[in-house]
Amino acid sequence: MDERLYFESPKVKVTDTRVVFGHDTVLVDKITAVDTNLRVFTLYASFIFCIIALMSFFIVNAYYSILFIGIGFIWARWEYEHYIELMVTVGEKNYKIASSSLSSRNCIYKIADALSLSLSDCKRRKLAPGLSETETMQLRRLLLKMEQVDISDLVVNPRKSAKQQVPEESSGGAVDV
């Protein structure tokens, strides 16, 4: 049976049976939750660190201030590039599928939609499993028998059945005991 492909990119592949990302593969029927995480707190923390580093330029030695400003801007840039994360929960373990910046967040949402579709199809397959060959053959035989049965045999006429159940009187006399 071929896998149905929901999403494919160089880093992530989502099919109806598995999710491949990086060097990891997760089975879809083992996934318990799909979540997008916005790293708001760490992004704000990096901006605040940059502001404090800029203010420290007037208080502390200029060399240390330039070092702190550089670290702050590198941290803020990294946080911005990894602002939105797509997480998948398998049992008790969380897997980070992908991350992106605000400007390319549509890719994360497309992957999340593909994962949701894959999960819903997996649940649908579990709830309504396909019939085996023997069950299909049994259903076919039953349908053929139903087509061959004459519908007039199935209709019961209450007047005829009542007359058939009433015993007819015998021509002979009653027997005394």
Image (cartoon, rainbow, N blue to C red):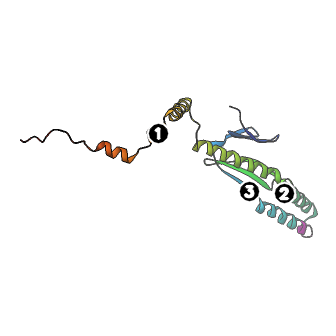
User: Which of the 4 image quarters holds residue 11?
Assistant: top right
Q: Are marks 1 and 3 in contact (CB under 8 Å)?
A: no
Which three-letter amino acid code belongs to the residue tagged 1? Ser
Residue nearest the viewer, comparing 124 with 55: 124
User: Which of the 4 image quarters holds residue 37?
Assistant: bottom right
Instruction: Return the x and y of residue 25 as percentages of the image width and height.
Output: 70, 38
Compared with 87, 48 (above or below) is below
Which three-letter amino acid code belongs to the residue tagged 2? Leu
Would residue 98 be counted in the magenta stretch? no
Q: What residue sits 68% from the left and 31% below the top?
A: 1
Residue 37 numbered mark, or none: 3
Residue range of the region highlighted in magenta in the rendering: 54-59
Q: How many marks?
A: 3
Q: In the displayed image of the protein, which residue is found farthest to the front? A: 171
Compared with 145, 58 (above or below) is below
Q: Which residue is mark 2?
A: 102
Q: What residue sits 52% from the left and 30% below the top?
A: 141
Residue nearest the viewer, comparing 72 with 33: 33
Instruction: Return the x and y of residue 153 as percentages of the image width and height.
Output: 44, 38
Residue 152 numbered mark, or none: 1
Residue nearest the viewer, comparing 139 with 168: 168
Q: Is residue 144 left or right of residue 55?
A: left
Which three-letter amino acid code belongs to the residue tagged 3? Asn
